[in-house]
Image (cartoon, rainbow, N blue to C red):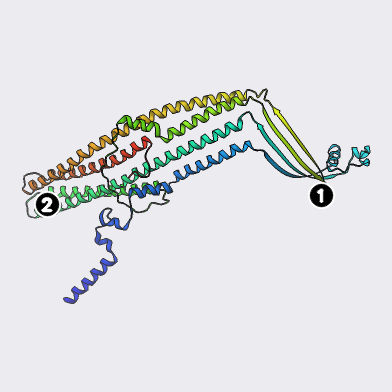
């Protein structure tokens, strides 16, 4: 007998070592199972998102591209210098005679009418260095440079807004993950309680102290909670995938959210102070103001197009048929150009610029109204969430106390089973409501900071 016991003990230990998850109660999301996942705080998630989020990376590239457009626009202030190398072979009478002149090889024999009218094929290698310098282009380059600079500042402001939006999205995704994790924990605790009650009712049924319908109702209650746990786990894994995507991860990974949902006070400011902050600090509003300035510059640019432009140009060229002997010449000059008629194209561009400026002005008005609405809404959401948390905390205490009383009364046969099950579900709802209130509080704080234009990576 002792040998058989030893064999059973050895087999049991072997199975526990080889298949440890079997003895851990299945897949768990809260508690000790988190030790196998990568611990991630809210600040870590924000930092990772700001580093790897593809939307933010794209915004950075837009800013860099706009900086290069400034260089392109300012290049119009400098002379444009080119060099070309060309080869020609021709029997065209005019071009053949001209090429010989350029090569400096004209002789008396070349004036023979027969040769002039029917020349032999001539080769020419032409090396040309030439330059064009717009001394005055009716302000087109100057206005273009100004617009490029304004565009760059607008993109920089848009980048700042994108950063804030990424932080807000990360806060929302992270708190959703924490809420999903807590929901699983709430269901787990309720399931443990329900299973204990089921075992109690089963014992009472075997002892003839309760009817079979109570036992069946308890079994149904446990099954419903198991279904709720499956659904809660599904929400957890979805929230985990959303957070990973927000952080710019190519594939979802296992992360353990370690920053709890807690209530924190906000900076004591009145609604009017938050509104003033939003009107002065919103990066998207700043970006639109730069666009408005650029549109005004475009109006001036289209007006200036009616002015004359002055260009200085020059060239130096070398011609040869075989590079043994070469001839060179140069040309310098200047020209003044004034557009007398463009088929109403210039006037249409001016009217287009006016409409574009009016469009941006109306967009600014709409954005200001939107900012006021977003700030007001977020402000009251924070205040509401704070009150909701206090009410939810009292509801949890009341629900737990009610469950304790009902449990005692059910044990004494004073209340039916349905009262006990209702009390259990009330506790679940109360705890979930508290977690929901805490999550909404954190997210509404982030929305208020985002609406005011002061949300940054140090939100936590």
- Please name whichever residue, 198 or 384, is drawn nearer the observer in this view of the structure: 384
SS assignment at label 2: helix
Q: Which residue was labeled with disc 2?
A: 201
Placement of the C terminus among the 4 image quadrants: top left
- Please name whichever residue, 27 or 47, is drawn nearer the observer in this view of the structure: 47
Q: Is residue 315 left or right of 284 when viewed as pictured?
A: right
Q: Is residue 300 left or right of 52 when viewed as pictured?
A: right
Q: Classify residue 454 by image quadrant.
A: top left
* Mark identifier at residue 435: none
Residue 327, percent from left and from top:
82, 44
What whole-number distance in Å separates the C-alpha atoms at marks 1 and 2?
Answer: 111 Å
User: Can residue 17 be seen by looking at this rendering?
Assistant: yes
Residue 144, percent from left and from top:
58, 33
Q: How many neighbours does mark 2 have within 10 angstroms: few (below 14), some (14-19), or many (20 or more)?
A: many
Q: Is residue 130 left or right of 16 when viewed as pictured?
A: right
Placement of the N terminus among the 4 image quadrants: bottom left
Q: How many neighbours does mark 1 have within 10 angstroms: few (below 14), some (14-19), or many (20 or more)?
A: few
Q: Which residue was labeled with disc 1?
A: 323
Residue depicted at 45% across the width and 40% down the height:
159
User: Mark 1–mark 2 contact, CB under 8 Å?
Assistant: no
SS assignment at label 1: loop
Residue depicted at 27% across the width and 55% down the height:
28
Residue 121, percent from left and from top:
86, 44
* Sequence-first tag of 1 and 2: 2
Residue depicted at 53% across the width and 41% down the height:
65
Image height of 283 relative to 15, above or below: above
């Amino acid at each position: 007998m002792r040998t058989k016991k030893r064999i059973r003990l050895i087999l049991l230990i072997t199975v526990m070592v080889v298949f440890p998850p079997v003895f851990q109660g299945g897949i768990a999301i809260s508690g000790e199972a988190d030790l196998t996942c990568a611990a991630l705080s809210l600040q870590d998630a924000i930092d990772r998102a700001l580093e790897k989020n593809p939307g933010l990376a794209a915004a950075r590239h837009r800013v860099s591209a706009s900086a290069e457009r400034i260089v392109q626009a300012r290049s119009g202030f400098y002379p444009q210098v080119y060099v070309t190398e060309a080869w020609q072979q021709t029997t065209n009478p005019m071009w053949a005679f001209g090429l010989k002149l350029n090569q400096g090889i004209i002789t008396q024999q070349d004036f023979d009418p027969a040769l002039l009218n029917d020349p032999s094929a001539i080769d020419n290698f032409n090396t040309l260095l030439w330059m064009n310098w717009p001394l005055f282009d009716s302000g087109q380059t100057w206005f273009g440079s100004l617009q490029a600079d304004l565009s760059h500042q607008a993109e920089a402001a848009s980048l700042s807004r994108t950063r804030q939006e990424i932080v807000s999205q990360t806060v929302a995704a992270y708190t959703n993950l924490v809420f999903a994790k807590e929901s699983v924990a709430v269901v787990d605790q309720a399931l443990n309680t329900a299973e204990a009650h089921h075992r109690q009712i089963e014992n009472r049924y075997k002892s003839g102290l309760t009817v079979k319908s109570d036992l069946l109702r308890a079994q149904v209650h446990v099954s419903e909670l198991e279904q709720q746990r499956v659904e809660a786990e599904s929400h957890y894994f979805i929230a985990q995938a959303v957070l990973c995507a927000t952080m710019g991860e190519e594939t979802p990974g296992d992360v353990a959210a370690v920053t709890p949902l807690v209530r924190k006070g906000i900076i004591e400011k009145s609604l009017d102070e938050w509104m003033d902050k939003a009107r002065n600090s919103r990066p998207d509003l700043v970006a639109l103001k730069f666009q408005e300035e650029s549109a005004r510059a475009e109006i001036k640019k289209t007006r200036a197009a009616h002015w004359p432009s002055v260009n200085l140009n020059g060239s130096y060229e070398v011609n040869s048929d075989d590079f043994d002997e070469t001839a060179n010449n140069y040309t310098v000059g200047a020209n003044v150009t004034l557009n007398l008629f463009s088929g109403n194209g210039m006037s249409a561009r001016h009217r287009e610029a006016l409409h574009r400026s009016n469009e941006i002005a109306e967009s600014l008005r709409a954005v200001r109204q939107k900012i006021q609405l977003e700030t007001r809404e977020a402000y009251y959401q924070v205040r509401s969430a704070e009150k909701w948390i206090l009410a939810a905390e009292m509801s949890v205490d009341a629900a737990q106390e009610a469950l304790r009383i009902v449990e005692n009364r059910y044990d004494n046969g004073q209340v039916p089973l349905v009262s006990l099950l209702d009390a259990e579900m009330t506790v679940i709802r109360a705890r979930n409501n508290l977690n929901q209130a805490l999550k909404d509080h954190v997210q509404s704080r982030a929305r208020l900071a985002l609406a005011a234009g002061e949300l940054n990576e140090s939100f936590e």
